[in-house]
Amino acid sequence: MLDKTLTVILAGGQGSRLQPLTLERTKAAVPFGGQYRIIDFSLVNCLHSGLRRILVLTQYKSHSLQKHLRDGWSLFNPELGEYITAVPPQMRRGSGWYDGTADAVYQNLYMLKRSGAERVLILPGDHIYRMDYAPMIAFHMQQNASVTVACMQRPFPEVGLSGVLDMDQNSRVNTYGTLQVQHQVDDDDVATAQVSMGIYLFSIDKLIEALEEDHDLAGSSHDLTQDILPRMVGDGGVYAYQFGGEAGRVSQDRYWRDVATIDSYYDANMELLDPVPSLDLYQPEWPIRTHHGQNPPARTVPGVSGSEGIFINSIVANGVLIVGGSVQHSILFPKTLIGDEAVIHNSILFDAVKVGDGAQLENCIIDKGVVIPPGVRIGFDQESDAARFTVSPKGVVVVPKGYRFRS
């Protein structure tokens, strides 16, 4: 069952709403949770589900992602037919780059046809969740489905503009597309809709047929959600698989986030600091794999002022050094340095950020390698912050990679 399933991870997204975090990297390569990259969650789901043939379709600013795959995910054995392979646009079926999710898969049909697979599992590379795909594959085979869509119930206010589905009592999808109903929601209203998670399991023959038909259609946006799935529903072979119902080893937390904006990304990170986090990173039977650099353990050190280096309710990665500073409700990635009497609160600091003595950060995301000069205050004056940095609608200040403060 699993050895006849080929996995395709779509990881070429530009992630424009996550800028400036995606100015230098694709969305799937954005750091998350103190030591991970977003794509680690899809990859580790494959690993624990027993899927060992994975194509990662890359495109936008993919160097950081490809380096991460090389350093952290070179664990499969090619002699056993196992692989994680990054696939940039090959231009085998035209002279253009990937133009939509369906076109990205279409341009690699030759790899699908020669794989010997009977099924193709298509995954987003930029969502945060844990899922055992094996029960979904078993469900797909039991229903003899053309395509199975993983879905979950979401409140109407959180439902997007597409990917909403309606199904019968046998989980056969009757309609798939855009939510047309304008629904007024009050405090007592718990109305929900079934929404696609962007996880699709195709029978390979049906997928090839649908992609070749879509390629020749004038006016198609070549998107799996907007074009391929709505047309296939009419044939009666589309089924819905309810996320969180699997009987696999992963805990049933039903956690899923599409961190598409600065605020949703920030919130998903901060949720990890809750007393009982929605996403449990510490489940021993489902560890999240990533690349770990060779760094010394994290350490707190008294500063010259006599202040003790402390951190409270924070995630502190290896290589972090807190020299007399205070870190509260924050996430520090590897090799971060916090100076004497610096105060970090409700913030996320990427790799190798250096915070000078007496600096203060509140509600910030500081990208990799930025040096914060001594005494600088960020996150306290929105007008001043907005003149220099990106400030999200909820007031999160983002200092981009490579930013240099004036002397």
Image: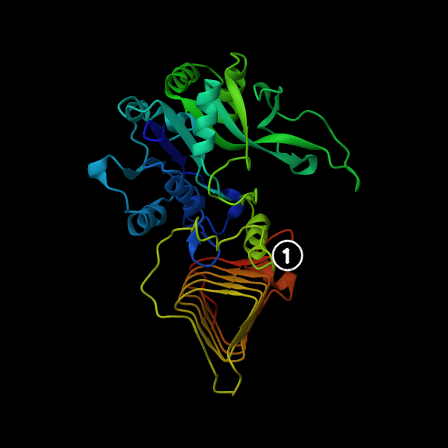
Q: How is the image coloured?
A: rainbow
Q: Position of residue 131 (x, y in %)?
A: 48, 40
Q: Is residue 246 above or below residue 342?
A: above
Quadrant in which the N terminus is drawn: top left
Q: Is residue 322 left or right of residue 184?
A: left
Asked whether the viewer can see residue 100, the reply is: no
Q: Position of residue 154 (x, y in %)?
A: 64, 36
Residue sitting at the far left: 79
Q: Quadrant of residue 292?
A: bottom left
Q: Position of residue 264 (x, y in %)?
A: 58, 48
Q: Is residue 280 above or below residue 219?
A: below
Q: Report crowding for label 1: few under 14, some 14 to 19, many 20 or more residues within 10 A (C-alpha).
A: some
Q: Amino acid at mark 1?
A: Gly
Asked whether the viewer can see residue 375, the reply is: yes
**Towards the viewer: 230 or 165:** 165
Tally of marks? 1
For numbered disc 1, what is the local secondary structure?
A: loop
Q: Position of residue 389 (x, y in %)?
A: 55, 58
Q: Quadrant of residue 113?
A: top left
Disc 1: which residue: 395
Q: Quadrant of residue 116?
A: top left
Residue sitting at the far top: 235
Q: Is residue 395 left or right of residue 149?
A: right
